[in-house]
Amino acid sequence: MFAKRLKQLRKERKLTMQEVADFVGVAKSTYAGYESGYRQPTLESIHTLARKLRTSSDYLLGLTDYPEPPEELNHNAKEYLNYKQLHWDGVPLEKEDLDLIRILLERVIRDRNLPKDH
């Protein structure tokens, strides 16, 4: 998965193997080995690759399916609940679960805005 995502993102970003290899500080042949799966980069190199490709190390390693780097993720809970493949500690959340969460959050916000009786 790592090699496939690495190659896919490099092409989407319209970068050459040489450009990415230079950024990481490895030979082009070493970088080509990363894309073919023949070689494995160090953790530090994975982090550097993620920066160059404007993604996260987690995405490159297959730990998330979202290629956007964390700082670009939407922090609006209402919109976040529309993302596919949300889970709670590994248990997938179904549409009905998300609808219930949405209703609960709407009520929390509505109740917060009600005048307080003293």
Image (cartoon, grey):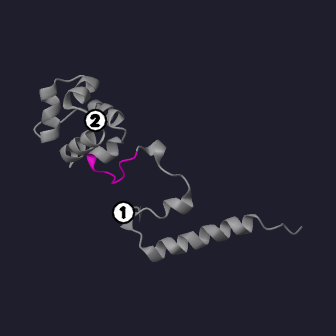
What is the three-letter code of the residue carrying label 1? Gly
> Within 10 Å of the Cα at label 2, are there few (<14), some (14-19), or many (20+) other Cα atoms?
many
- Seen at 47% across and 77% down, the residue is 96
Q: Earlier in the sequence, mark 1 or mark 2?
A: 2
Q: Which mark is residue 11?
A: none
Cα gap from disc 1 to disc 2, whole angstroms: 25 Å
- Pointer 1 and pointer 2: residues touching (CB < 8 Å)? no
Give the structural element (helix, strand or loop) at label 1.
loop
> Within 10 Å of the Cα at label 1, are there few (<14), some (14-19), or many (20+) other Cα atoms?
few
The residue under label 1 is 90
Residue 19 coordinates in the image, percent (x, y): 25, 27
- Seen at 12% across and 28% down, the residue is 29
What is the three-letter code of the residue carrying label 2? Ile
Give the structural element (helix, strand or loop) at label 2.
helix
Q: Residue furthest front?
A: 14
Which residues lie in the magenta part?
Answer: 61-68
Looking at the image, residue 107 lies above or below residue 40: below
On screen, residue 105 versus residue 16, left or right, reads right
Observer-nearest residue: 92 or 2? Answer: 2
Looking at the image, residue 3 lies above or below residue 21: below
| Overall secondary structure of the magenta section | loop
Residue 101 coordinates in the image, percent (x, y): 54, 70
Residue 83 coordinates in the image, percent (x, y): 43, 62
Dot in front, 1 or 2: 2
Residue 61 coordinates in the image, percent (x, y): 27, 46
Q: Which mark is residue 46?
A: 2
Q: Is residue 71 magenta?
A: no
On screen, residue 21 versus residue 57, left or right, reads left
